[in-house]
């Protein structure tokens, strides 16, 4: 592709958990932190409330997933050549992330390769060297127009993709289909729960702190960014978190 061609940023929204405001905040954050031409896409079944400048891609039809549709396995379908008319480097971002710094590096790192977060494991497993070869799909990059093999593997092995006894998450199957996987540098993408929340009982009286050198903060599971800003009471006391108002400096329109 020509050097001045725009890169792509892609997100996914369906159902009611995340409203249009989440897409608009992500779009605004990308505008602040990506200093090169880009196109911003949202694959969704409901485009109402999305800001101008957000290009929408209709939610694809069920390719044969038996557990129901829509489903998170749509993340495999976005790699189909020609999906949404996208071409070239494409950065997928989950809606529940906060962009904290320049993200141009996510397009300059391992150019032309598939890149993904090396999924976080608990500290005990990491200390024992048990860090499985599994990505976290909150932030991954692929080459639109050159990633058909990922999509075809999904179609060919859809039954295995759905079988949680083989691949416990869609991101485990995505990592498998990528074949040659390149992990983002650890500090670029951090888990809010893992790197900001203090261990019990300190979580009850210490405010979560932003992790050093983090570019994209990931809120996988709960809390979501808006919940973390105001403080969060989890189902268990060691999941409670004090308010983190600093997140609002990054997660905003």
Image (spheres, helix red, strand yellow):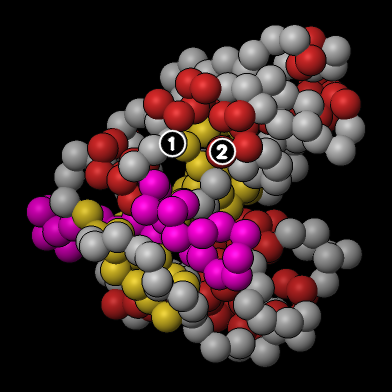
The secondary element bearing badge 2 is classed as helix
* Location of mark 2 (residue): 225
Left or right of 205, for residue 140: left
Bounds of the magenta segment: 1-26
**Horizontal and vertical percent for residue 57?**
38, 76
66 vs 84: above or below: below
Q: Is residue 96 visible?
A: yes
Vertical side of 232 occupied by 72: above or below: below
Provide the secondary structure element on which disc 1 rests. loop
Labels 1 & 2 near each other (Cβ < 8 A): yes
Q: Which mark is residue 251?
A: 1
Q: Is residue 72 above or below residue 84?
A: above
Residue 10 in magenta stretch: yes
- The residue at the point 31 percent across, 45 percent down is 28
Relative depth, front residue between 140 and 197: 197
Quarter location, residue 228: top right
Q: Is residue 178 left or right of residue 83?
A: right
Residue closer to the observer: 17 or 180: 17
**Looking at the image, which residue is at 40% across and 26% down?**
249
Front position in the image: 133 or 187: 187
Q: Quadrant of the N terminus?
A: bottom left
- Residue 123 is situated, as x and y percent measured from the top left of the image, at 79, 24
Picture coordinates of residue 226, whole percent (x, y): 56, 39
């Amino acid at each position: 592709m020509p050097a001045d061609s725009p890169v792509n940023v892609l997100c996914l929204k369906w159902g009611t958990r995340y409203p249009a405001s989440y897409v608009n905040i992500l779009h605004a954050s990308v505008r602040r932190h990506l200093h090169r031409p880009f196109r911003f896409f949202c694959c969704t079944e409901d485009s109402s409330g999305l800001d101008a400048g957000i290009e929408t891609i209709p939610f694809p039809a069920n390719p044969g997933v038996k557990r129901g549709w829509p489903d998170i396995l749509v993340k495999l379908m976005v790699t189909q050549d020609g999906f949404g008319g996208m071409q070239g480097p494409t950065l997928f971002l989950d809606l529940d992330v906060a962009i904290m710094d320049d993200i141009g590096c996510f397009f300059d790192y391992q150019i032309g390769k598939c890149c993904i977060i090396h999924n976080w494991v608990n500290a005990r497993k990491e200390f024992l060297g048990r860090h499985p070869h599994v990505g976290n799909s909150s932030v991954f990059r692929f080459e639109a127009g050159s990633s058909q093999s990922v999509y075809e593997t999904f179609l060919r092995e859809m039954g295995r993709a759905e079988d949680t006894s083989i691949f416990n998450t869609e991101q485990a199957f995505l990592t498998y289909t990528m074949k040659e996987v390149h992990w983002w540098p650890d500090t670029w993408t951090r888990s809010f729960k893992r790197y900001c929340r203090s261990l019990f009982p300190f979580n009850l009286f210490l405010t979560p702190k932003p992790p050093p050198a983090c570019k994209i903060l990931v809120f996988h599971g709960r809390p979501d960014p808006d919940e973390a800003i105001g403080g969060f009471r989890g189902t268990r006391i060691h999941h409670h978190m004090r308010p983190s108002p600093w997140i609002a400096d990054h997660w905003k329109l």
